[in-house]
Image (spheres, rainbow, N blue to C red):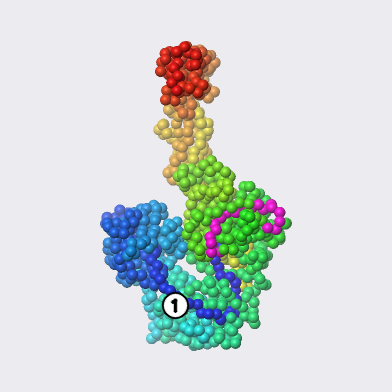
Amino acid sequence: MTWRPRGFAALVACSTVVGAAAAVLPATAASAAASAKIVFTEFEYQDAQEAGGVSGAKYEFFELTNVGDAAADLTGWSFSDSHKSTSGAFNFSLTGLGSVAPGQSVIVTEATAAAFRTKWGLAESIVVLGGENVGLGNGDELHVYDTSGTAVDNLVYGTSPRTQGTTGVPISAAALGANDITQWQLSTLTNDPKSWAAPNGGDTGSPGTSQFGSGIDPRATSGGGTGTGGGTGTGGGTFTPDPNWAKIKVNEVSSDNAPAPIRDTVELVNTGGTAVDITGWLQGDSGGPTSATVFSDRVHLADGTLTTSVPARGFVWFQSLPGLSSSGDAVHVYLPDAAAGAAGTEVDGVTYTAGAAGTEDPASFGAASVARCPDGTGVFASVASRSFGASNATACQQQVVNPNGPTPNDLPAPCAPEGPSLSDRYLPASPLPWPGSSVVTTADNQCYFETSTGPEGRDVSGLVFSRTEPGVLWAVKNKSWLFKLVKQGGVYVAAPGWTGGKQIFFPGGTGQPDSEGITEGPDGAIYVTTERDNASNKIALNSILRIDPSAAGSTLTATAQWDLTSEYPWLSTGNSTEANLGFEGVTYVPDSYLTANGFVDQRTGAAYDPANYPGHGAGLFFGALESNGNLYAYALGDNGSFTRIAIVSTGLPKVQDVQYDPDLGRIWALCDNDCAVTSTLLKIDSTGSIVSEKVFSRPAGLPDNNIEGFAVAPVGSAGGQTREVVWGDDGIYGAGVGSATNGHALYAGTLNVDLGLGAQGVPTAGVSPSSAPVGSQITVTGKGFAPGETVDVALTTTPGSLGTAVANSTGGLSTTVTVPAGAVLGADEIVLTGQTSGITAKAALVVLPATWMKTKAYNAGDKVSYNGRTYQALYYTSGETPGSRAAGAWAEYATDAAGNVLWTATGVFKAGDVVLYDGIRWVAQYYSRGQVPGSSPNISWKVVVDNANPAPWIANSVYVAGDKVTYEGHIYQAQWYNAAQVPTNSKGAWKLVG
């Protein structure tokens, strides 16, 4: 699952609060050991103008960002490409970059600094080092070295995705320093919150800033960054707020006056992707606007640096000048949009009760501060430790409750929902509306999934409908629990024998599987993915478990495990955050679907052939990796062996579930609230790759929560034009505390049966029959064309069209055409060509002569077809049925698929003709008709001898001097012409040579 802080304390924004306890103040960033960290955060090997052929356009660049907390002096540092040179022609000095401050991004480009700033519209303050002369290629390497020649960061990239007119940026912080291009993506205006379109040239990117750095807007005329924004409103002027002011939230408050340096402190968080100017903003306490004073002159970043803006998705803190009472008070933040710059519009606020925000007096019950759990979006909770200037994630795991206050939520303990965090970070560009009803209802009983290893009721992750047991919904909880559910009274409850679910274990009955994804195999087993063993949650364990659900008892032990952890080294850092970004979902995809649509095996570069992977069963398992949004296809073998067949990009930055839909012949992938709960439908395209076909937003009735489960019911269960869909809310948060949906894990909605999908798969053609006489009709079929397009039908060797057909809604077609009289006899091909798409497909066809007619007269040399065979007239004939007389007017001629001439009883052969008979090649010694090769010696036929590869001796063949044969394990050579002479008793006709 995506990590979410646990639990609530009794505190609600702008309302009454309870909870928490005083604890030792955590070390601030300023007091901790500081260090610099330089990493690659963006690159572009060819800009749009150069790609378009504009002469002299050379703007390739890479960006370095200091993601550490201390400045880095780059004097003596250097850059190289795939040559990995620390000196010489393929090394470029970075000394000109000087000192790089924490969060600062700097640029190195082959253009001049002035030209690059003009192209991208950058401010003069942005550090640009021009004249880079090593050069970036389409498929190259980036290496930065410090003064000692030690590599500081590296990035190896291939030819795809091609950074041509669009820059490459990391998908998440996990990509920084990982040297894994699969964790990078092409920058767009939606997936890179800092990107923009260059005013000169049309490129898309964000040079000079990074969402993993300070997040300032580096453009010359943006008005963002750390500037003054719209002014303070003083002197009677008009105040214009930053357009993203509403993204600022009060995130943490402490009213504890005892421990210096933090006293009466307020933290703000920016939930948006752009830095927000807070110049002139005011803060007050329970006295409301009249108590408010300007605080923007004393706002600090985590390291103590003063700032007047809140970085994108960043945190700042300041001391409240209106004193905050430990006996209960409030914090309100205002825009200075009232008269004379006074407090006007309230941005955000919180009210807390006695002791809830920390106190040094007897009212204390253990609170250090009151904090949003999770950051920016959750309800406030009293926590035992402070986290000013940083995320509340760790602090929220140590919540304390006011013994005299209300319960942490409105549900009976131990049930404890958790709100979503980091919502809508990656919004798809133009998702389609959900193809079903917008109405979604809860589909389980409140707090139904409480278990001994997860009593709070959360963490239902993967879902899948059974295809073998109608009406059964399988669910897995990442606290090592499996549920078999059936629907009763509109909600899903335990199937008979499954009350409370069953706890699952690794093979041997050990461990606590962090079970995330689930699929049903063709063997009736349930397959579950794990990210970790919850007993060691800092250690990645990405594996697939096989569970036999028919096993007796209240617990289930995996019968097999495939450990794939080594495939994802960037998740094995010993950090619980990275370890928790592994396999979120899994689905079984049958070989029949993959082969029918021409799926390409990335290992071989050719069409996937199941026979290459003996013992893997009848399909592949596709694992969904949360870290980068990719699917990984595996053939699972015996004894835990596996082979990776392909990596599939879903087009989503994160992925929480995946499901093969046999009714649609497509694969679904789901991203949770990170992407506003977006689903993508994947298909096999005309090249054999799996790609996104359609992207759908969530139905309006589904909450924008940590939705990790997704299951589509079989069409057969629908009984109409729609079918059921079930989603799983990992945090059981619903619409929040007090809502009717709070405490529910399952949501049910509908999906249209017909989604109006088009063609998929590698285009193919077929023809029946595969051998046809000229003048006869054949049936031509095809698939993989654009729906509704006209498709031409032709022969490879014969000019002109045989006809056309219109592709149906799925890109398929079937039509009947006539083999033209002028067609070239023999092996040929039917060619289908889409007039709109240009897609082509071919099928083999053997063109035969026209069908024999009893009433027609034929001359010597005329060819006909009769009963699927080809005959040639030896002389004038009429009325004689081909093949009716061994020495008649008609001679049969035939070849096999390889083009070998076959011996036929009526065929006429002359000296030197070579035929194939019973798998043996024979050469005619003189004119022959009706004489079977090898039937008797010393007549028409002699076996073809290959002395380099001697064949077994044949009694009914003649041999000439020099011919070699094998006999009884030895090689013999003929000394003279002979026939029927056994090599071991040949009176000198054969000589033993091997």
The residue depicted at 68 percent of the width and 60 percent of the height is: 501
Q: From this viewpoint, is residue 171 visible?
A: yes
Q: Position of residue 658 (x, y in %)?
A: 55, 55
Magenta highlight range: 537-555
Residue 976 within the segment the image draws in magenta: no
* Figure quadrant of the C terminus: top left
Q: Nearer the viewer, residue 465 or 319?
A: 319
* Figure quadrant of the N terminus: bottom right
Total numbered labels = 1
The residue depicted at 43 percent of the width and 21 percent of the height is: 993
Q: From this viewpoint, is residue 681 visible?
A: no
Q: Is residue 961 above or below residue 788?
A: above
Q: Is residue 96 above or below residue 258?
A: above
The residue depicted at 55 percent of the width and 58 percent of the height is: 541
Residue 548 within the segment the image draws in magenta: yes
Q: Nearer the viewer, residue 72 or 885?
A: 72
Q: Is residue 829 above or below residue 742?
A: above
Residue that label 1 marks: 31
